[in-house]
Amino acid sequence: MTTILGIETSCDETSAAVVVDGVHVRSNIVASQVDLHAKYGGVVPEIAARAHIERLDAVIEEAMAVAAVTKTDIDAIAVTNRPGLVGALLIGVTAAKTLSWVWGKPLVAVDHIRAHAYSPAIGLEEPPWPAVGLIVSGGHTSLFLIHSPTSIELLGATTDDAAGEAFDKVATILGLGYPGGPLIEKIAREGDPKAIDFPRTMALRNDRSLHRSRAVKLTDSLDFSFSGVKTAVLYHVHGHGRVSGGLEKLSSPQIADIAASFQQAVIDVLVRKTMLAVARTGVRTVVLGGGVAANKALRSALEAACVERRLNFHAAKMAYCTDNAAMIAALGYHQLKAGVIAGLDVDAYASAL
Ligand code: KG4
Ligand code: ZN
């Protein structure tokens, strides 16, 4: 039995968790900072870092108390060291280094996006790999071919906005508040997803194998672009050439239709590209993770596409969609087993691996 303490401070959630053998979550404490950032309409990096400093000790203590473990039970400390807000990441990394040194336990540095990619496996009896992973968060939208927890290949990624970022920006355009994803999902339930035909952008960027072939079709790329649909919503609300003033003219049912149609456009692209990745790789399992994976309409649409093609489908449990330390401890276990240990000189980085 290998017990890992996980620490996550990459953005606006202060989280610590205790996970056994990479799948059994003994505790997962998440202190959200949503209330601190809401009035600014987005995450303020300095406020996030300061709140992590104030809360992390208590969050770690609670995670260990709930799991009923002491330092002697902990085999290693896993911490997110990329990607994220560097000031925020440094708080978790510094705490993890300190505990590693004082307790004499190995330190494991975990990539946050790869942890999101692993998160659908938490709690499963059998590992789901190999799988195509759709990872949709506020900072990233990526398709991976996951061979194993420690062997992950990037198939495609967004060329501009992440899916969650588009949800957040469209929520701002519609005057719904922050964070936008859950608010759009809620109001979309009242609207008609077919009311407005927003663009389904099929981006093409750095898919080198396709560039080499002669018949390059935009629909063949595994990259994403969500800035176009966001701008289409902006124009729909305010009209071309105008920057504000349209929202007051819209009724609540009209706003609900816009939210539902926007959500459907994003989901259509995510599902189509994921199925393209399945066809391209021949893999028979699809996994879904990241903050936007909490969206029930996306979960059911992707599940339906998988059922239709007789593919296995595993979405991360709701508690492991938005940022959490359980996924960091869980992937940290596999890195520890593979001997991927960090030194006390490990740094924090804004970019993904
Ligand atoms: O994974 P996450 O917690 O943080 C990052 O790593 O970025 O993802 C946060 C993102 C935000 O953009 C938020 O609006 C979005 O996930 N999100 C949702 C839902 N819940 C959170 N988007 C759509 N529907 C939801 N229910
Ligand atoms: Zn995340």
Image: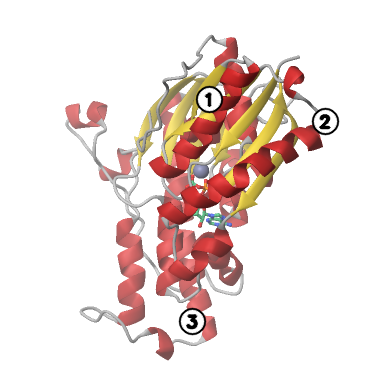
Q: Is mark 2 within 8 Å of ligand 1?
A: no
Q: Residue at x 54, y 82 (%)?
A: 253
Residue 131 in the image, given as x and y percentages of width and height: 54, 27
Residue neighbourhood size for the residue with mark 1, other residues' Cα within 10 Å, grouped as few (<14), some (14–19), many (≥20): many
Would residue 58 appear left or right of 350 to someone viewing this image?
A: right
Where, by quadrant of the figure, is residue 168 drawn?
bottom left
Q: Residue at x 50, y 27 (%)?
A: 110
Contact (Cβ within 8 Å) of mark 3 with mark 2: no
Residue neighbourhood size for the residue with mark 3, other residues' Cα within 10 Å, grouped as few (<14), some (14–19), many (≥20): some
Residue 68 in the image, given as x and y percentages of width and height: 82, 30
Q: Is residue 327 above or below residue 167?
A: above
Residue 181 in the image, given as x and y percentages of width and height: 52, 60
Residue 13 visible in image? no
Q: Residue furthest right?
A: 68
Q: Viewer-proximal residue, 286 or 30?
A: 30
Mark 2 or mark 1, earlier in chain: 2
Q: Which residue is mark 1?
A: 97
Measured in 3D between alpha carbons, the distance from the residue under mark 3 to the one under mark 2, in whole angstroms, is: 51 Å
Which amino acid type corresponds to the residue marked 1 in the rendered image? Lys
Which amino acid type corresponds to the residue marked 3 in the rendered image? Gln
Q: Which residue is mark 3?
A: 254
Mark 1 or mark 3, earlier in chain: 1
Which amino acid type corresponds to the residue marked 2 in the rendered image? Ala
Residue 149 in the image, given as x and y percentages of width and height: 55, 21
Measured in 3D between alpha carbons, the distance from the residue under mark 1 to the one under mark 3, in whole angstroms, is: 52 Å
Q: Residue at x 19, y 31 (%)?
A: 211
Measured in 3D between alpha carbons, the distance from the residue under mark 2 to the one under mark 1, in whole angstroms, is: 22 Å
Q: Which residue is mark 2?
A: 68
Q: Residue at x 70, y 39 (%)?
A: 28
Where, by quadrant of the figure, is residue 24 drawn?
top right
Would residue 314 appear left or right of 157 to someone viewing this image?
A: right
Q: Residue furthest bottom?
A: 249
